[in-house]
Image: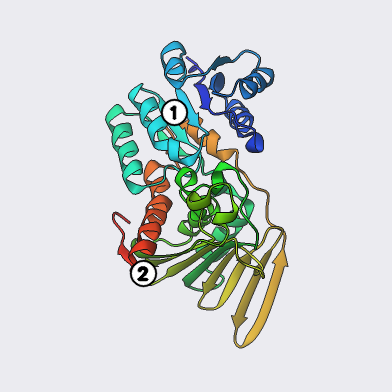
Amino acid sequence: MKKKKIKVAVIGYGGAFNMGRHHLTEMKAAGMEPVAVAEVDNARALVALQDFPDIQIFNDVGQMLTQSDVELVTIITPHNTHAALGLQCLKAGRHVICEKPMAITTAECDALISLARKKKRLLSTYHNRHWDGWILRAVDQVKKKKTIGEIHRIDLRMGRRGKPGDWWRSSKSLSGGILYDWGVHLLEYAFQLVDSEIVEVSGFAREGFWGPQTKWKGDAIEDEGAAVIRFKNGAWINLCISQLDANPKPGFVEIHGTTGNYVIDWNHYMHHRLEDGVATTEQGPHPQSQSQKFYDNIAAHLIKGEKLIITPEWSRRPIHVLDLAMRSAKAGRALPAKYG
């Protein structure tokens, strides 16, 4: 007998990037059935109804959980709400996917993981960039084929000079801080390349320049945030996200190996090698991204029992690093990691 479709919903249908429609469209393409949207903004709720005419609209998450037959809920709301909403949905017996990041603190991640295990429900994070073409090629070349030897350092960077916008992502209490947007993606890339436990994290932060010029004032994100992540195998990661960088360097991922390095930029890769004293550089376009594989895997896991790729433990890893980085920056010293 053919198994029924998984009935899905989203919490949040905000206008930024139109992510509500994006998620429901990808879920539908993976064979799932969109049945509900929870959205407090009536104007955005009407947009959801125009996009999906047969869907149920709720202004309250609790009502959606009690009055609909939704089985899996994706949370698309400000970062500081992910943990509370995730726990609410898990308690109601639903499978849960959080938009990236999973949560803001390690403790929040651990609470979600613990309840998901207790309720025997799926818990994941929308790390669709796990299948970006640029990291797929880097994993194949650098990790599998070892084209630059052994990896010893990865530089992750995103920067420009400019005042943060006045949306919620520029609020530290709502977003978690400057590292909690692209920093989470960049760390998830790097963790695909380094197979080792995290030993410690050193965090650094500079604030007070842009903040007073924004509507968030003292609650604004940092002007610049950075972290150094040390691994048990001796490798390390340098992560830096900046609003003060007047001269950004090419590439946002740079992988350093014993015989060369590999740079990922927006439109191309640069593969530098040094063999027998001869330096060579190869440059080319990235292969096509395969982000739909995220929801394909979710559906296959729930219906066919296939292995879950973006596990809650995997989702916790970058959050634990950023949590430690924020606390380390305040303490002025490195902090030990827990559970890798």
- The x and y percentages for residue 144 are 51, 62
- The x and y percentages for residue 257 are 52, 74
Q: Along the polypeptide, which appears first: circle 1 or circle 2?
A: 2
- The x and y percentages for residue 124 are 43, 38
Indicate the amino acid at tag 1: Leu
- The x and y percentages for residue 315 are 42, 46
The label shown at residue 302 is 1
Compared with 245, 322 (above or below) is above
> Residue 9 or 244: which is nearer the viewer?
244
Residues at marks 1 and 2 touching, judged by CB atoms closer than 8 Å: no
Dot 2 corresponds to which residue? 233
Q: CA distance from mark 1 to mark 2?
A: 35 Å
Q: Secondary structure at mark 1?
A: helix
Q: Is residue 239 left or right of residue 200?
A: right
The label shown at residue 55 is none
Q: Is residue 335 left or right of residue 141?
A: left
The image quadrant of residue 307 is top left
Q: Secondary structure at mark 2?
A: loop
Q: Residue furthest bottom?
A: 277
> Residue 311 or 162: which is nearer the viewer?
162
